[in-house]
Image (cartoon, rainbow, N blue to C red):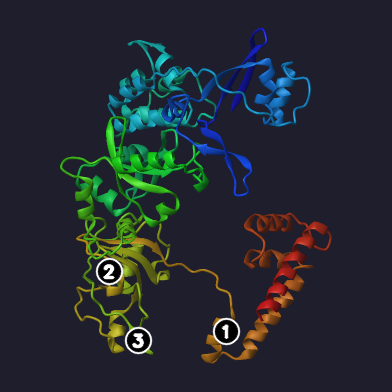
Amino acid sequence: DTLSVFKCEAECFAVVVRLKHPPKIYELRREKDAYGLEEEVATRCLEMGGVRNETFGSCYGYLIRVSSENLQPLFANANRDKLHSLKRFGLIDRNLYAHHDAPKTSTLVIRSGKNEVYRILERTQNRRVGMLLRSLMDNGRFSWYHALHDTVATPRGIKNIFELVDCAHWIQALSILESMSGIKRPTSLPAKVFYALLQAGEDTEVESNDDRVALSIPEYCTLAPRLLLTPTRLAVVGFSVEMSNRVVRHFISNESFAPECFLRVTIGEENGARLSSDQLSYYLCLRIEHLILNGFSLNGYTYRFLAYSSSQLKESSLWMVNTQGSWTVESIRSWMGDFSMCETPSKVAARMGQCFSTTFVASGTHDSVPHGVKDNFPDVLSNHNGKEMCHSDGTGLIERSVLEFMTARLPLGPDDPTDVSIIQIRFGGAKGTLAGWDFSLLRSLGRRVPHSNRINVLLRPSMVKFNAPYRQLEIISFGMKIPYYLNRNVILLLKVHGVQDEIFLKMQRQMLNDLDDMLIDSQKAIEMIPSLSGPDSSLSSALVHMLFCGLSPTHEPFLFSCLHAIRAHHLMNLIKKS
């Protein structure tokens, strides 16, 4: 982030470095490769000079004493801007291109007061405020040292930022801390900044003690804390408003859990990037395994591993929970369902993750919808050469009128409920889709649909993955219309159903004419570009913008070349796939 060099004594310099993120710690050693040649191998490690990784994770500033002969090797691999800065200091008088061995560390002196900060955060009156305060320090907005030692004079005495936060109303404190999180550069005056913002907003009355009202959180969302687990630290990233899920929704609403009891943990690099497999040394894997399986303490609250969804697994993410009352991790999993029918650990984890899908509640106490569910409606099966095939795998039925009724009352749904013909759902241990049908029409066609008016949702056995007591219908997403393009299989099916060859030939001729016309007609190009594959979205937007500005492909060579390349791409695909 910043680098400064000072001459502190004869033939000795002090290099002061401030990092944006904690450093990576490597152990360098020489090993022989398959051909017997020695090579230098860097292995990610958790300590250096007897100092553990947590200390490096809390330090962003470093002072390095360097002799004049080691100054050049130290910055041999620095970028050109840093070298120019050192030249302006008069410390380097020639370009450095050679690679040199880094100087050896002699003495490592660590001074830390982070434990005192942790003890203060444990005593913070509001749990969310404490997490947000920690996130500001973990994200480098200000350091623990300045948080302890920067003070401001108030009518109640001299106070640091922790004392100012305790004196303010918790909703005001949250608002100010959120504003401070937007500071682009680190500050060494956190108390003074907080107090200035507090005075600027002291005339604003707190209208509600309800955090949902105060923070404008939609009813179907939750404010989830996020934590980054790295090789050197546990960093609170902050809070994010996201759609809720079955487990979080139930335990916050019915079991007196605070939103901060559920923690989204991501395993990654110090800067938040994905932790690649070549960085996972033996000791680093042990650290991650220990923290996940044994849990950890955050601001005085113990979090333990609960589960993860399929999408989280791809992102190296998981859920951890701080249990309340008589609840334990095991009892929460028991409430989620009976997973005894799952034969492998990976299948158990996948089924638990099913309970963490982000959903809207479409029934029950929320926006109640009268409905009845039959969960053993038979699948559509056939037998071919002794092999049974399921043609309705994962797809059930829902009464069309009930589907439209629910769609009209759910957030983020389409403007016209009649546009929806299918929805993706969760119900207890069932997952899949429900297709909207008129049940009376199905009965007239001889389908075995129940005659009871109370049954309007039909689940098939192929949809039920495990047994769960949860009996609320949850919607993940609505079916939507998307563009569809002809291919060989679709053309063959349409021909079997009576579509004549001349229809397809006519469509092909029209497509070829449009590709030719867009090279000379700006309006035709504007109509064609958004619907054509090949160029990415940024290029398509740029071309459309050029055309809207009045540029013509007949007069602008670059625009003509781009359109010509798009035309050639589609002609080549037509030749290859015909």
Q: Which comes sooner in the sequence, label 3 or label 1?
A: 3
Determine the residue located farthest toward the left in the rendered image. Answer: 326
Residue highlighted by disc 3: 382
Disc assigned to residue 114: none
Residue 88 seen in render: yes
**Image quarter for residue 210?**
top left
Residue 398 seen in render: no
In this view, 285 is above or below 312: above
The percent coordinates of residue 519 (x first, y second) are 78, 67
Q: Which residue is located at x 27 percent, y 51 percent?
A: 247
Front-most of 310 and 23? Answer: 23
Q: Secondary structure at mark 3?
A: strand
**Image quarter for residue 302?**
top left
Q: Which comes sooner in the sequence, label 3 or label 2?
A: 3
Residue highlighted by disc 2: 464
Q: Which three-letter amino acid code belongs to the residue tagged 3?
A: Ser
Q: Which three-letter amino acid code belongs to the residue tagged 1?
A: Ile
